[in-house]
DNA sequence: TATTGTTATACTCTATAACTATA
DNA sequence: TATAGTTATAGAGTATAACAATA
């Protein structure tokens, strides 16, 4: 059996622009991790608490939030407790099913979410220093990528 | 003082391709979080352990690794303990300064790092389904971005 | 004196399993 | 019976402060 006959992913990577692009994107994102953590820490938020605030665009059952955060439902209890103590979210009855509790952002929670979102939306130097043409091209490609994601099964 | 006179970041965002591009990149990355966590979990690794394996390209003082992972040195002790128990890294004397301990990947650690890297390097559908031209353009733009990052102070 | 890595402490996140209350 | 959320538990990550060994 000739192992060279059918190149594996590691070999293909060098010729595959998609793999290369994804690797470079990961690098740019990795370089941004420090600022991300530092920003949340300024607001006394742990990453999962931020993910929760960000996910609560509309009243959301706790179990559904667990799915969005890719964690067990039991964790959502604690995360919610701490956000609720700070007055950032509320537990609300669901009406149709008395087992379900809907999480809702308070006014204070919405304000905090918007403030942090604005801070994190500032692009890092690696992106901000691209030429205007590159920035526009990148935006357009990413728009198409997000469309792909929306149509994907996952 | 007219608050409308000088639009803030939130207003600028809609006209700024860099901000838009960064926001969309964040969206693509966020959508990939589930696969990232699931992949590490397959190998019984927590994210910080993976970041450590990934950072250890060469023998590295523990304090320097703490800087790379943006955490306190005291955490590196525990993370290293667990990686060392599994035979993935080694603590080695530094020679010139007997306070310093260098962390080195073992053969087993290098193999595991390469295997995981190969898995994570597969682009998500949102990127893989872009046209060949878009993938090449994205790769080229990201190459310039990474260059920017390398030249940046941060 | 200052620095490297460790230990002790306290808090948060994480999954699993057992539980309550609903359905 | 099955499901939504809680509690209990144990292991992992996190920062702070105090410490030993070394510089």
Image (cartoon, coloured by chain):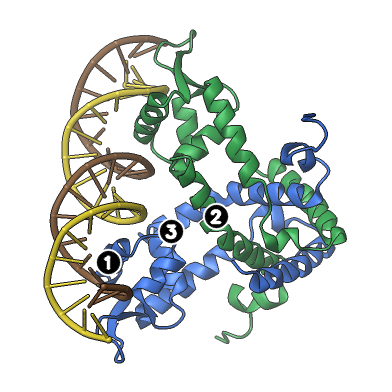
Chain colours: A green, B blue, C brown, D yellow
User: Residue farthest to the right?
Assistant: A133
* Image position, residue A52 (x, y; %): 50, 35
- Please determine whether, in this image, residue B25 is positioned above or below residue B96: above
The chain letter for the residue carrying disc 2 is A
- Please determine whether, in this image, residue A4 is positioned above or below residue A68: below
Q: Is B28 left or right of C14, judged from the image as shown?
A: right
Determine crowd level at label 3: few under 14, some 14-19, many 20+ residues with C-alpha closer than 10 A: some
Q: Which residue is mark 2?
A: A35
Determine crowd level at label 1: few under 14, some 14-19, many 20+ residues with C-alpha closer than 10 A: few
Residue A141 can be seen in this image: yes
The chain letter for the residue carrying disc 1 is B
Nearest the viewer among C6 and B31 is C6
Q: Which residue is mark 1?
A: B77
Counting residues from the start of the chain, the first of labels 1 and 3 encountered is 3
Residue A154 can be seen in this image: no
The chain letter for the residue carrying disc 3 is B
Determine crowd level at label 2: few under 14, some 14-19, many 20+ residues with C-alpha closer than 10 A: some
Discs 2 and 3 lie in a common subunit: no
Task: Compute the Cα span from label 2 to label 3.
Answer: 23 Å
Q: Nearer the viewer, mark 1 or mark 3?
A: 1
Task: Kindly identify the residue that appears in the image at 42 percent across and 77 percent down.
Answer: B111
Q: Is A145 left or right of A107, judged from the image as shown?
A: right
Task: Compute the Cα span from label 1 to label 3.
Answer: 21 Å
Task: Compute the Cα span from label 1 to label 2.
Answer: 24 Å
Q: Which residue is mark 3?
A: B40
Nearest the viewer among C11 and B40 is C11
Mark 2 residue element: helix
Discs 1 and 2 lie in a common subunit: no
Q: Nearer the viewer, mark 1 or mark 2?
A: 2
* Image position, residue A1 (x, y; %): 55, 85
The quarter of the displayed image where residue D5 is located = top left
- Please determine whether, in this image, residue B66 is positioned above or below residue D12: below
């Amino acid at each position: 059996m000739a192992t060279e006959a059918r190149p594996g992913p590691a070999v293909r990577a060098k010729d595959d622009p998609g793999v290369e692009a994804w690797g470079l994107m990961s690098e740019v994102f990795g370089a941004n991790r420090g600022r991300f953590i530092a920003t949340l820490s300024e607001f006394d938020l742990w990453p999962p608490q931020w993910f929760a605030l960000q996910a609560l665009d509309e009243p959301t059952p706790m179990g559904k939030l667990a799915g969005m955060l890719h964690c067990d439902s039991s964790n959502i209890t604690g995360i919610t407790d701490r956000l609720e103590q700070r007055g950032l979210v509320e537990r609300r009855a669901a009406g149709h099913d008395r087992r379900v509790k809907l999480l809702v952002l308070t006014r204070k929670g919405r304000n905090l979410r918007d403030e942090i979102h604005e801070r994190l939306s500032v692009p890092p130097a690696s992106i901000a220093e691209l030429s205007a043409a590159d920035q526009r091209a990148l935006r357009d490609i990413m728009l198409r990528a997000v469309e792909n994601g929306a149509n994907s099964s996952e």
